[in-house]
Amino acid sequence: EASLVLYLQGLCAYWGLQCYLAIIRDHGGVVGVLLANARKIITIILSFLLFSKPFNARHFVGLVLVFVGVYLGYLSKREVKVSLESNKGSVKPSSAEKRRKMKVYTEGSHEHSV
């Protein structure tokens, strides 16, 4: 019986990971992280709904802090993604161009003695 439970847990973990990787492949890493965090929040909410637990002011504050943390994580990842997308159009100098600029700089900085 224990080996059956272990096998089913492994099977569920495998399929969960496959779904998570498909989400990342199709929609990007930010969406994957957001869904993973949303799953954690839903788990917390369901634990209070399914199991009779008292819900007091501390629980509410904790839940609000979790929501704020997830939202701030979303904003920071969105800003990084936007800044990366805005830099795609910029042309970076090639290695040869960098070497040429460095050579001009070093040659011009030496004093020549006669």
Image (spheres, rainbow, N blue to C red):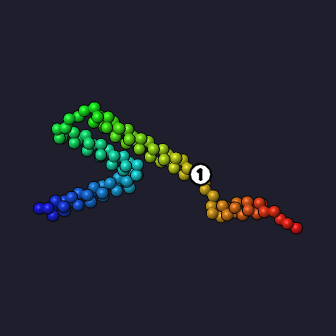
Q: Nearer the viewer, residue 59 or 29?
A: 59
> Residue 87's x, y, as percent?
55, 50
Q: Is 110 drawn above or below residue 47 in the view shown?
A: below
Q: How would you rate the neighbour count of disc 1 (Cα within 10 Å): few for under 14, some for 14-19, many for 20 or more?
A: few
Residue marked by disc 1? 90
> Residue 37's x, y, as percent?
33, 46
As drawn, which residue projects farthest toward the front?
Answer: 58
> Residue 31's x, y, as percent?
38, 48
As drawn, which residue projects farthest toward the top?
Answer: 57
Q: Left or right of 81: which side holds 22?
A: left
> Residue 64's x, y, as percent?
33, 36
Q: Nearer the viewer, residue 96 or 102?
A: 102
As drawn, which residue projects farthest toward the left?
Answer: 1
Q: Which residue does the image show at 27% across and 60% down from the upper left?
A: 14
Quarter holding residue 12: bottom left
In the rendered image, the quadrant that contains the N terminus is bottom left
Amino acid of disc 1:
Ser
Q: The residue tagged with tag 1: helix, strand or loop?
A: loop
Q: Which residue does the image show at 27% across and 36% down from the upper left?
A: 59
In the rendered image, the quadrant that contains the C terminus is bottom right
Q: Which residue does the image show at 38% across and 41% down from the upper left?
A: 69
Quarter holding residue 62: top left
Q: Is 48 drawn above or below residue 5 in the view shown?
A: above
Q: Left or right of 61: which side holds 28?
A: right
| Number of numbered discs on residues | 1
Quarter holding residue 19: bottom left
Q: Left or right of 73: which side holds 60?
A: left
Q: Left or right of 42: which side holds 33?
A: right
Q: Which residue does the image show at 29% across and 34% down from the upper left?
A: 58
As drawn, which residue projects farthest toward the right?
Answer: 114
